[in-house]
Amino acid sequence: MNNYIKCTFCNHDAVKYRTGNLSAFTPADMRITDSQYGKHWNLWKCTYCSVVFANPLPDESLLVQTYAQMNDSAYAEEETGRKKNFTRLFTSIEQVTTSGGRLLDIGAASGLLVELARLRGWQAEGLEISSSLVEEAKQKHIQLHQASIEDFTADMPFRVITAIDIIEHLHKPEILLKKAWGWLQQDGVLCLVTPDIGSITARLSRGKWWHFRPAHLYYFNKKSISHLLSKNGFEVIMIKHYVWHFSLSYLLSRFKWHPKLSLFKSIIIPLNLFDSMEIYARKSKA
Ligand SMILES: [Zn+2]
């Protein structure tokens, strides 16, 4: 293998960052809640924009097919924790823009964020590629658009677009940014959440970092995500840490311990490892 390759985003030289410990991918690897930490592809780091990316990338059509068929019951079990994540997120969204208006959640899963947004007075819609997750949402009376980012067309502009833990999964992250740019109103806000490979937690955990997983194809830090956003017509207005909330039983299951007591499910623990970023960006004026 070559000692360096070109960066996908800026075409500068990228050097080997970590040798991968994965060869083939299985659909189970792509689950939202998979616990295969420390597993990743061959990773390269751009010497200019500092993005870390997988190369070679897993086959795109296989990836799309896998996400389209995805269902993840463990995700639903963690609903309480996720609601807390999203409630906290909304306090920030409502700081950077006026509350209410049209909101689109990309990668909406079973519609939790959409539901929460509606309760807060937003006209919220969600985009989800997995038919079983769309069906799950429907049963909770949340109508989602079942389409890929490439195929979706927005009939009216949105004030806010959210994509929570999506961009690092995509074969071509810039498509998300280009589409979002087109779907947002002029003063609209894009809110991304993605792991921060520049964080102290990531550095200390080295190869065991819990965000190193087969489904993650790109790893950003503040510099590389800001670079990519500005390249695609966005101006970063705020970056902060994302706080995760998990039930105690979920956290214990990550350590291969599966307590049967439902009490463990009702105890919700906020976990801020300062290794996930919340990025708020607006369309550049020019
Ligand atoms: Zn680069």
Image (spheres, helix red, strand yellow):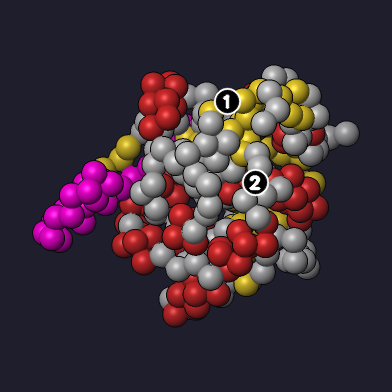
Give the answer, above or below, for where 1 lies relative to 155.
above
- Give the residue displayed 70% in from the left and 28% down from the top: 2
Few, some or many residues within 10 Å of mark 2 (<14, 14–19, 20+): some
Q: Secondary structure at mark 1?
A: strand
Query: Can I make out residue 258 in this image?
Result: yes
Point out which mark residue 57 bears. 2
Instruction: Tell whether position 240 is magenta.
Output: yes
Few, some or many residues within 10 Å of mark 1 (<14, 14–19, 20+): some
- Give the residue displayed 39% in from the left and 47% down from the top: 36
- Give the residue displayed 53% in from the left and 52% down from the top: 24
x then y, percent, for residue 64: 63, 62
Q: Which residue is mark 1?
A: 17
| Quadrant into which the N terminus falls | top right
Query: Can I make out residue 93 in this image?
Result: no
Q: Nearer the viewer, residue 217 or 174?
A: 217
Q: Nearer the viewer, residue 130 or 213?
A: 213
Please report whichever mark, 1 or 2, sits nearer to the chain's N-terminal start. 1
Segment tinted magenta in the rendering = 238-265
In the picture provided, is 74 more to the left or to the right than 147? left
Under mark 2, the amino acid is: Leu
In the picture provided, is 213 more to the left or to the right than 258? right
Quarter of the rendering containing residue 94? top right
Q: Secondary structure at mark 2?
A: loop
Under mark 1, the amino acid is: Tyr
Instruction: Tell whether position 245 is magenta.
Output: yes
x then y, percent, for residue 81: 33, 52
| Quadrant into which the C terminus falls | top right
C-alpha span from label 1 to label 2: 15 Å
x then y, percent, for residue 275: 45, 31
x then y, percent, for residue 205: 38, 26
Cβ atoms at labels 1 and 2 below 8 Å apart:
no
